[in-house]
Image: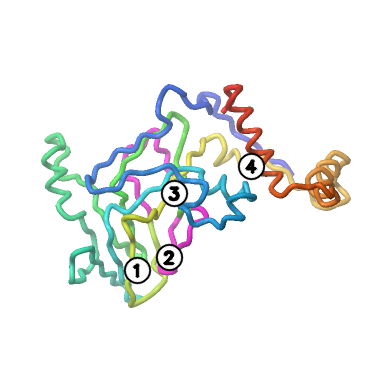
Amino acid sequence: MHGNISTTAEIDAQPDRDAPFASFFRLIPQCRLPMRADRAAAGTMPTRAFRYCEALTSAAAFGWYVFPPMSFSLMWDGGWQVLWTFKGEDAWYPLSKAQFPGFADHFDSTAPEDVKGFSPPFLVSFKEPGVVQIWSGLVVRTQPGWSLLIRQPANLARSQGYESYEGIIETDHWFGPLFTNVRLTRTNVPVEFDEEYPFLQVQPVHRSVYGNALNNFEVVAGLDQMKPGDWDAFRTTVVQPNIDPQRQRGQYAVNARQQRKQAAASGAE
């Protein structure tokens, strides 16, 4: 089954190597700076997976970690009310829309005159029960044609108290707050966000590979429709390693790393 693919010839999929691929602007000065996601999933990946599973390590390292601008907690009553508090506070406050403490004054002291009063909110409680928008304290700009997929960190243990909605932001032209929306899943207990633990992973995607481009795909509906070349590829990937008495563990990882080195040496990566 095939679909139609829309081309974006005017957009170069290759980034400018002389310019930063992504520029992170820290608006809230207390924010921990973003960092490159790492292959060990912030040191939490099991050793065997780190050594032998290239698929896991590649996914873990794809993108950048983003941290909450401070440690804070949310609590949902299961209905329409969300409360929040933050490190150093003993009280809980009803959440409608909240600024990061002290940020509005800091923003107005630096922003141009016509921009004063437009500091982005830190937290917003939506009309949908238990849904909260959280601003990272950052604004991001990417190279032309490139967007950012906003998601929970790959292969890191996740909080059982909330789920993040994933989104794609066209950050090459949308210069606004980098935020995420979360849905609280536990009621009447604090759901904590730690400023030292990443709560987002942002990953670059080119606009030519999402949207209408995904209409162009094929489905092979059964074994009887596989071609000789498909079976040859299956033999190479599955059969030969399992009948080879000298097979080394993690051969896929070794091959993938060799290919990356070769691509880097030839200037293709």
Q: Considering only order in the chain, which callout, 2 or 4, is on the residue closer to the N terminus?
A: 2
Looking at the rendered structure, the kind of residue marked 2 is Ser
Under tag 3, what secondary structure? strand
Q: Circle 2 sits on which residue?
A: 159
Looking at the image, residue 98 lies above or below residue 22 = below
Q: Considering only order in the chain, which callout, 1 or 2, is on the residue closer to the N terminus?
A: 2
* Label 1 crowd (10 A; few <14 / some 14-19 / many >=20): some
Q: Circle 1 sits on which residue?
A: 191
Under tag 4, what secondary structure? helix
168 drawn magenta: yes
For residue 230, the mark is none
Q: Nearer the viewer, mark 4 or mark 2?
A: 2
Among the 4 quarters of the image, the one containing residue 85: bottom left
- Which stretch did the figure color magenta? 154-180
Q: Position of residue 214 (x, y in %)?
A: 61, 42
Looking at the rendered structure, the kind of residue marked 4 is Asn
**How are the residues colored?**
rainbow
Measured in 3D between alpha carbons, the distance from the residue under mark 4 to the one under mark 3, in whole angstroms, is 26 Å
Q: Position of residue 130 (x, y in %)?
A: 36, 68
Measured in 3D between alpha carbons, the distance from the residue under mark 4 to the one under mark 2, in whole angstroms, is 34 Å
Residue at left 24%, top 42%?
27
- Which image quadrant: the N terminus? top right
* Label 4 crowd (10 A; few <14 / some 14-19 / many >=20): some
* Label 3 crowd (10 A; few <14 / some 14-19 / many >=20): many
How many numbered badges does the structure rendering display?
4
Under tag 2, what secondary structure? loop
